[in-house]
Image (cartoon, rainbow, N blue to C red):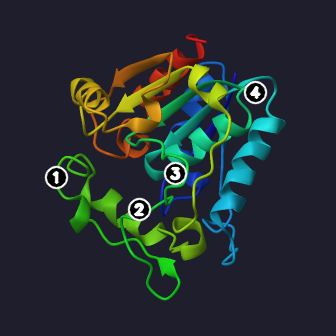
């Protein structure tokens, strides 16, 4: 199956370099995306441009695809499901939750001079990043891409309730499936309360399993392709 891979903030398609060969070994065709404004040099890119890029990848896939969003990009994956519910076979959300219609795409860090730069590792100290070796942290930080404010401040628009019928797997890295279920039951993941086919996958990693547990992550994603 074609698997569209969307990395979160400050990352381009190379974030999936260790996952791609593992998925290929399992018989799938991974499609790692470098998003507009997030690795392609387009400083004028907007949130809508990023959504359009993900939808274009889904349109170009060979049959209904598995769409994978990581962290903030879970909102992009969900937007693609909303736009093309009949062409997304399954959506996997890694370490993040979809946004709701009318919400800001990414409001956790305020823009500085028109961009949101990588803030360093301090805000992610603890379970988010404890599993990343120092040399890997240095490499990731050196390659981090400042994201244009027109992307982070974009407003999510969702219109097609058929998205709720697309199977969803919430991949739980720095939090557990039990915690995610508690959040769902308490209303803290409102975008998924109407999902009709939702399951959870545990992975023993921090927030960036594509770097620290690529084989295990590939196995989880391959398993998603079997639960269509």
Is 151 on the left or on the right of 93, as rendered? right
Closer to the camera in the image, 170 or 33: 170
Judging by the rendered image, the residue that carries numbered circle 1 is 126
Judging by the rendered image, the residue that carries numbered circle 2 is 140
Q: CA distance from mark 3 to mark 2?
A: 9 Å
Residue 87 has which mark? 4
Looking at the rendered structure, the secondary structure element under dot 1 is loop
Looking at the rendered structure, the secondary structure element under dot 3 is helix
Looking at the rendered structure, the secondary structure element under dot 2 is helix
Whether 195 is drawn above or below 34: the answer is above
Quick check: marks 2 and 1 in contact, CB under 8 Å? no
Residue at x 36%, y 37% (from the top left corner)? 189
In the displayed orientation, state which residue is furthest to the left.
126
Quick check: marks 3 and 4 in contact, CB under 8 Å? no
Q: Quadrant of residue 190?
A: top left
The image position of residue 91, as x and y in percent, is: 57, 29
The image position of residue 127, as x and y in percent, is: 19, 46
- Say whether disc 2 or disc 1 marks the residue closer to the N-terminus: 1
The image position of residue 169, as x and y in percent, is: 46, 24
Q: Nearer the viewer, mark 1 or mark 4?
A: 4
Is 44 on the left or on the right of 166, as rendered? right
Closer to the camera in the image, 227 or 138: 227
Judging by the rendered image, the residue that carries numbered circle 3 is 15
In the rendered image, the quadrant that contains the N terminus is: top right
Q: CA distance from mark 4 to mark 2?
A: 33 Å
Closer to the camera in the image, 136 or 60: 60
Whether 125 is drawn above or below 162: the answer is below
């Amino acid at each position: 199956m074609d698997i569209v891979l969307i990395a979160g903030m400050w990352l381009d398609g190379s974030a999936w370099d260790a996952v791609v060969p593992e998925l290929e070994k399992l018989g799938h065709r991974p499609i790692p995306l470098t998003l507009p404004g997030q690795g392609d040099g387009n400083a004028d890119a907007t949130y809508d441009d990023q959504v359009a890029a993900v939808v274009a990848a889904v349109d170009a896939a060979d049959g209904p695809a598995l769409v994978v969003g990581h962290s903030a990009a879970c909102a992009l994956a969900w937007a693609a499901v909303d736009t093309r519910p009949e062409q997304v076979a399954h959506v996997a959300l890694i370490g993040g939750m979809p946004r709701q219609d009318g919400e800001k795409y990414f409001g956790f860090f305020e823009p500085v001079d028109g961009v949101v730069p990588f803030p360093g590792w301090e805000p992610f100290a603890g379970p988010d990043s404890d599993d990343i070796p120092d040399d890997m942290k240095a490499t990731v930080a050196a390659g981090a891409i400042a994201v244009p404010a027109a992307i982070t401040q974009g407003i999510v628009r969702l219109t097609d309730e058929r998205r709720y019928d697309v199977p969803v797997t919430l991949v739980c890295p720095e939090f557990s499936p039990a915690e995610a279920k508690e959040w769902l039951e308490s209303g803290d993941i409102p975008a998924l309360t109407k999902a009709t086919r939702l399951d959870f996958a545990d992975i023993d990693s921090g927030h960036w399993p594509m770097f620290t547990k690529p084989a295990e992550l590939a196995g989880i994603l391959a398993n998603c392709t079997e639960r269509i």
